Amino acid sequence: MVKKRLIPCLDVAGGRVVKGVRFETLRDIGDPVELAQRYSDVGADELVFLDIAATVAGRGPTLELVERAAQRLTIPFTVGGGISGVEDARSLLRAGADKVAVNRAAFDEPALLTELADEFGAQAVVCAIDSRGGRVVTHGGRTERETDAVDWAREAVALGAGELLVTSIDADGTRAGYDLELTAAMAEAVGVPVVASGGAGEARHLAEAFAAGAEAALVASIVHERPERVQELKAELKEAGWNVRI
Amino acid sequence: MRVVLADYGAGNLRSVCSAFARAGAEPAVTTDPGEVAAAPLAVIAGVGHVAQAAAGLEPLVDVLRERVAAGRPVLGICVGLQLLFQESEEGGEGLGFLGGVVRKVNAPTVPHMGWNELECPRPSHILDGLDGDDVYFAHSYAVEPDDEELIAARVDHGGPIVAAIESGALAGVQFHPERSGAAGARLLENVLVWSRSA
């Protein structure tokens, strides 16, 4: 079977990698492409660049960063943040991104997912869903929505999303473990890969997310200061019997 | 060595180009049939739908067909592999260089997304040294050749999936060598050796 993936997420704002706790208080972590290369070197399976300032500030995604990353990386990467339509996605994919992650734009205009899947194939379309207390939130956790996150996930996949990136805002940055209830409910509800996000602290947490049905686990704060941690986490998962790429 | 990538508006040929350059080739993206005819290796790469890809590739179909007839190397990557076959469940016709169909992957999770381990049922040029290696997949459809002897590698995801084929000067991979780390680099180096000798 396809291997369980470990995916470092680089939250990008103003061309730098940042990390926040519960989407507040941002800390500068480093240069995105430099970090991306280091992650690739230590065995990251894939990368996500999320421009967390793009939706809030309403500006377009950073193509220059994507071009630089695409030239250097030999692992796949997804780009998200501020993608409002097909043309944004096209620019990013043409610049070398393997997948685009859409969040608010898809929630506000679900047909976008179908347009993207028709145009680029479902495998290039990630629907990012942020959840607080089981309900959808957008704009980096700043805007509460009424919709049940699992209901939205089901609809998003029916419309064309080929992967779900599910972030629990409650768990994000806490290092206390992924929201397993949310992860399991998502994996149960859809037939596309689910990427669990928010709350990773140690290898055991990733294993729990895989056991809950996630095909991949996003990591951020626990690897940003020491990328070699990626290698250690995967070795620990392998040791525990998980089918990961070493 | 000159490698031409047939441009049919699929985007993201840049990453494949960079990967071929790293492997020591001189890649170029082109819409010019003359260039596609002349190069030692022609590559059909890309993602998305077979039907759209086939439509975009229309101006280059004749020259690709001539290459195949003359036994000159053509490599398909991902949808490029699917295009080598006749018809797709997704709708639309491929180029029909090889007999077989393209079917939706039947697995608990689709798309088949991520790293998976190559199993090679027989030796081949392009997969030399890669049996058991992990490579990256991102697709919902897969080829089923009429002639199983063409199959150079499979992976398991809810059952066997064809990961690579090789038939004379025609080859294809379902995975993305440009995004498959060291194993992907090895594949492209093998492809260059194979296309020099084919």
Image (cartoon, coloured by chain):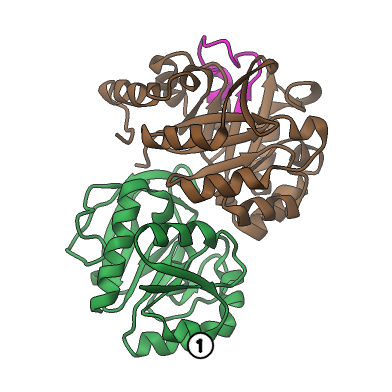
Chain colours: A brown, B green
Find residue A80 and report its image quarter: top right
Residue B21, position in %: x, y? 41, 61
Between B37 and A147, the one nearer to me in the picture: B37
Is-magenta flag for residue B83?
Answer: no
Between A127 and B92, the one nearer to me in the picture: A127
Q: Residues within 10 Å of mark 1 (few under 14, many from 20)?
A: few
Q: Is residue A198 above or below residue B59?
A: above
Residue B42, position in %: x, y? 42, 76
Q: What's the residue at 39%, 21% (across, down)?
A: A229
Q: Which residues are magenta?
A: A166-183
Find residue A43 and report its image quarter: top left
Is-magenta flag for residue A174?
Answer: yes
Between B136 and B120, the one nearer to me in the picture: B136
Examine the residues drawn in magenta and state their main secondary structure.
loop
Residue under label 1, please give it: B34
The amino acid type of the residue labelled 1 equals Gly
Query: Disc 1 on helix, strand or loop?
Result: helix
Q: Is residue A27 above or below residue B75?
A: above
Residue B133, position in %: x, y? 26, 47
The N terminus of chain B lies in which quarter of the figure?
A: bottom left
Q: What's the residue at 23%, 71% (across, down)?
A: B149
Residue A68, position in %: x, y? 56, 46
The C terminus of chain B lies in which quarter of the figure?
A: bottom left
Residue A15 in view in this figure: yes
